[in-house]
Amino acid sequence: MGPGIRAVLPSAGAWGSAVLALAGVTTGSLAPLTTLLAWVEKVPFPLGAIPFALLLGYLIYRGIGRVETWTVGGEAHQPAAPARYVAPPDRPPIPEPLPVDWSEGELGTPAAIPEAAPPAPSPPAGTSPGEPLPPGRATLWTKAGGTQVVSEDWPTATVSVTPPVPTSFTQTLVLGFIAVAVALLLLHGYLFEGLDRVVGALGAVVYWPLPWPGLIAIASLRRHIPDYVFVTYLALMVAFCLASGLFTDRGYPRSFRVRALVIIGVYAGVEILADMLFFTVSGRFLTSVFLLSRAIIGGLFFTALLFSTLVFPPPIAAEPHFPRARRALGLFFGTAFLSVVLATLVLYVFFKYFGIGREVLPFAVLLLLPLTALTIWGVIGRLVYEIELIARPTPSLEEFHPSVSVIIPAYNEALGIQATVRSVDRAAALYPGSTQIIVGNDGSVDRTSELARQAIGGLEHATGAVLDLPHGGKSNALNGALRVAEGEIVIRIDGDAQMSRTLGFGALVPHLSDPEVGAVQGLILPLQQAGWTRKLRFMEIAWNHLFLRRGMMATRSAQVVDGAFCAFRRRDLLDLRGWVPWNGEDTEITLRLQRMGYRTRFETAAAAFEDVPEDYAGLRRQRIRWNRGGLFAHRRHLGALFGTAFEFGGLSILLWLSMFIRGGLRNLVWVFAVLATLLRGLPTLSHVALITAILLIPRGLVIGYYLVKYGKRRFLIYVPFWPIAGVLKQGFTFESFGSMLPGSQPEFSE
């Protein structure tokens, strides 16, 4: 709220006299009580806050207990303690790497790939490539041994082969948000005046017998933007209930509706309590900073509404088998605190001395402070990561080069599977140890199996096999390939990706000589160059992967080791029982490894190029799947917040929550700004446009640096369009909510 007039509230003595009068008792007949009230009025601290504090503490305690019961489930699993690998005495020489070239030819486009090897011998009858396998049958093909039946009772799963059918969920959500926000803006004179009076009365009770030091904005409502954080989240919650059909679809249990009403009602009550406290903060800048707390409150309640409505896989408990790393707690929270303080100082200088965002200061702080703090956090995290590498150095490939199995999950990847296999074979030529390539064919109905056999039959630097399985999802292919893998190190690469022919995969492996490192991600770049989706994807990789991810890993708060190109120890994967059968299996296994106490690493000296959708429809399918997977995985591991070692997994969940709860407000606040301008005549759009431009500065510098570093200077002109990516991602996030309502498919394949 903007500054207003001081509330005129009754004193403690007036409150006491009023209560006695209502009870029909005169103050003269109860002189001792009147004397006590007069004495209480002189007490120098608010007595009314005591019962409120006790009640609030009790509610928080009970709430945490209920959340813990809801989030923790399953059985703890304790894998065997890892052991350090001992390199064999005889080490073959390591080939000299080629000069790195990030030009078009390096990307391994079809024109740059040699012709396919001669076709392999035809498989036995009944197992021809492309022909669906009988239920439960799994076969393994090798060049030397032909086709062998691995299993006659391979478990199968019901998996949708197409993504969810587009629905009107997102449109209903956005239109519902606009409708509710418009109604609240038009009625703000009544709504917020009433709320302010409730806030003032609550402040008088809590601060009794002292006067409430707060300011109310009733007199200035027509000149200032109302409490847009509360309006935004209230509108979002109501719109979500409308879009999900929570109160119109009889398929929802009654308990779902009751929970939703309780969550929205409690949110309104907490907002009133927050106003009572924040209205006592003086100074426009400081008040705006405290506004972030309001955004966190709204985000938490919206997240609670989501998690109580959407359908998720069951949670799991996990116990670490490494000693506590309490230093990680201080490192994480110290880095976060320092980042917020420095970001606040930077913005204060800009606002005070340059006047940036002065007219819409709350908007500016709410949008700029988190991003500025995140940028500073990324810089500090990168420094911590480099220091950690110095403290825990990796051996050279001459010292550590165990056998490697590269597993390639594939479903209907006939278009690119041969290019993928040949790129891995070229990368194997750079690795001094032995390399095995396994294509896990997840029941493809095209020529994936046939073409994969041709490519495996033509290997020059590696051995290989094709595992044909009944269709069961990506995790089915991954776990099947893991089952037949022989290497000590397992490297995963997608069936539509290609390894760099100059960098290969070797640099991933030495990180796993450290028994505390459980997963390593390599550098992933777009395979194609043409098209707006590929340009946006590179900018996304520059910000999220190249800039932020190592900071997350250094503070033990990594969200994912991308499955498109990463490495693990085979023993660890077997102990963890492989990947889970849902979308987002790479995020889930990353969180599970961290809950066990493992560290994660990022290596830019090993690279692969991923296939990026060429149009909006393909991008939509991919991002809905990614968003579903992220929500699945983080919901499964919310119990890490209550684990025996919070630094193992809990920090990852906490960081994800802090970013997720802000996601709903991040883009919808722009919508509210437009509505406030149109309906209230507030000159906000020009100021919001200025704030948007300022938002691009830290990200633009980071993205521009990596564009230049990786030879993509021609992409620099697209940096101003980066906000488009944020708008699209928010829309895909909303649409993923609609694909997770009761009755939805738990996993789908493309």
Image (cartoon, grey):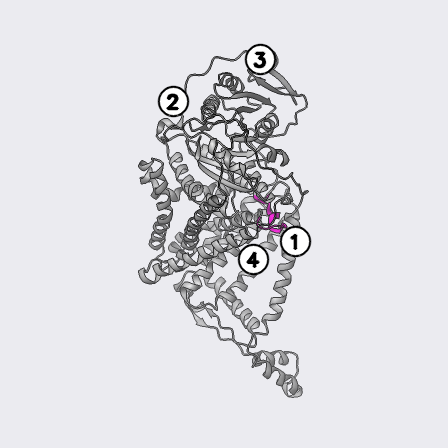
Would you say residue 247 is visible in this rendering?
no
Q: Is residue 644 inside the magenta stretch?
A: yes
Regarding mark 3 in the picture, which secondary structure is present there?
loop
Which mark, residue 262?
none
Per the image, the residue denoted by label 2 is 112
Which mark, residue 123?
3
Per the image, the residue denoted by label 4 is 267
Q: Which callout, 1 or 4, points at the residue further toward the start of the chain? A: 1
Regarding mark 2 in the picture, which secondary structure is present there?
helix
Q: Are marks 3 and 1 in contact (CB under 8 Å)?
A: no
Per the image, the residue denoted by label 1 is 66
Q: Are marks 4 and 3 in contact (CB under 8 Å)?
A: no
Q: Which callout, 2 or 3, points at the residue further toward the start of the chain? A: 2
Question: Residue 104: which quarter of the image?
Answer: top left
Residue 564 appears at what percent x and percent y? 49, 33
Give how far apart the Cα atoms at labels 2 and 3 are. Answer: 30 Å
Residue 236 appears at what percent x and percent y? 51, 50
